[in-house]
Amino acid sequence: MKILIVGSGGREHALVWKISQSKRVSKIFAAPGNPGMTQLAELVDIKPTSIIELADFAQQEKIDLTVVGPEQPLALGIVDEFNNRNLKIFGPTQKAAMIETSKSFAKEFMRKNNIPTPAFKVFSSPSEALDHFSEAQFPLVVKADGLAAGKGVYICKKKEDAAAAVNDIMLEGKYGKSGERIVVEEFLSGQEMTFMAVCDGKRVFPLATSMDYKKALEGDKGPNTGGMGAISPAPQISRDLFDQIMKTIIQPTVAGLKFENKEFKGLLYAGLMITRDGPQVLEFNARFGDPETQVVLMRLKSDLVDILDGAADENLFDVAADWEENVAGCVVLATKGYPQKVVTGHRIQGLERAKSLGVEVFHAGTAQDAEGLATSGGRVLNVCAVAPTLKDAMAKIYDGISFITFEDMVFRRDIGWSRK
């Protein structure tokens, strides 16, 4: 098979890494890919948002399966374009992807389908939102309605914080059209975890659980990011909780979308809060999480292509998965200033020495030029490992990180060790 991976981050590097282990695969292309993928895939200079160009390439190269990493191509309808050309692709249609691309749609959908989620209100008027804050109970959460790369979420302890969030999102337009509406929801206490499942439109194939660390700073402080690290399995998971999540959240979501003629094929991601009253949905994504994918794939012993191909063929009947009992961890190395403005172009050193310790290093924001490897984004590298215990996995990762250097490098030193 010829496989095309759409995207350029750590998630896509991990997908390339895992797919390259399949005996079914003869060639992998990555569009646009990154320097870390060059030994496993041929890089194609097409942006993820150039969906017509990507479809043309898939036709010309006779690609057997395309796997979409980031959310923007899904929002633009890449799956619809590929379906119109009878090109096989893993991912939801534009309509089904609304479960991620519009938080207000997702919240209303959950309310209709009795899927547990925090109480909420939707506002398209800044003044109405500000009026609501005068009588609201704090803390509460303010979210940009549309895509914001994991950064459009504000936990507000008092009215002034909520007003500042409205100013950022709606008045200053920090997230563009994604901030034309906001969702204001109840703040929940508990433990967060990630539940990802592959769907073929009707059937659901759950993956190993994980937990990510969204806050920029140690102790779960600072602004929300796309993710600063992850571990798998989620420490709070049990068989009863797993079954409850499937029964009350994942299966009703897939059935509800099908009922609304938004049949979901692809990767359904549920960001959950495990509360005293059970699991509740904080957000849905319509694609693999980043960096959760990295730790989940580190533990997958089976052929990932069988799973993705089965979903794209609407046939998950015969698919099974074998998982490492060991624990996986991931720490994101970022550039100082992330998730706000960062300065890029700093030289990266020490990757081979780090890898000699047995860690996997997935590239997230790197660039290659005549002088070598350099930083090109906020999140730069993902350092990952598997070991019999979480303590061993994280020790191996932090040992590997000690050999990696670039100017303004920052990372959380408490991934896997502490949690509120």
Image (cartoon, rainbow, N blue to C red):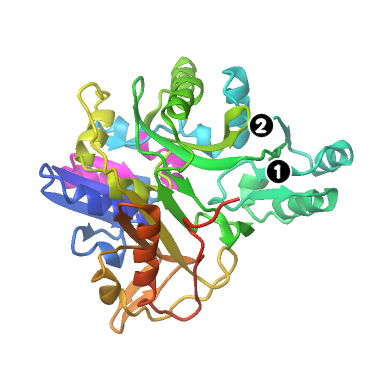
Q: Quadrant of residue 387?
A: bottom left
Q: On screen, 393 above or below 337?
A: above
| Direction from residue 127 to residue 253 in the image, left or right | left
Q: Tag on residue 118?
A: 2
Q: Quadrant of residue 322?
A: top left
Mark 2 belongs to which amino acid?
A: Pro
> Is residue 281 highlighted in magenta?
no
Q: Tag on residue 342?
A: none
Boundaries of the magenta span = 56-79
Q: Tag on residue 141?
A: 1
Say which of 24 and 209 sits in front: 209
Q: Within 10 Å of the Cα at label 2, are there few (<14), some (14-19), or many (20+) other Cα atoms?
A: some
Name which residue lies at 42% across and 40% down. Answer: 74
Residue 135 in view:
yes
Residue 47 in view:
no
Name which residue lies at 54% across and 56% down. Answer: 418
Residue 317, horizontal then vertical, whole percent: 23, 21
The span from disc 2 to disc 1 (Cα, nearest Å) is: 10 Å
Name which residue lies at 40% across and 32% down. Answer: 93
* Secondary structure beneath label 2: loop
Quadrant of the image for the N terminus? Answer: top left
Q: On screen, 352 above or below 263?
A: below
Residue 226, horizontal then vertical, whole percent: 51, 54
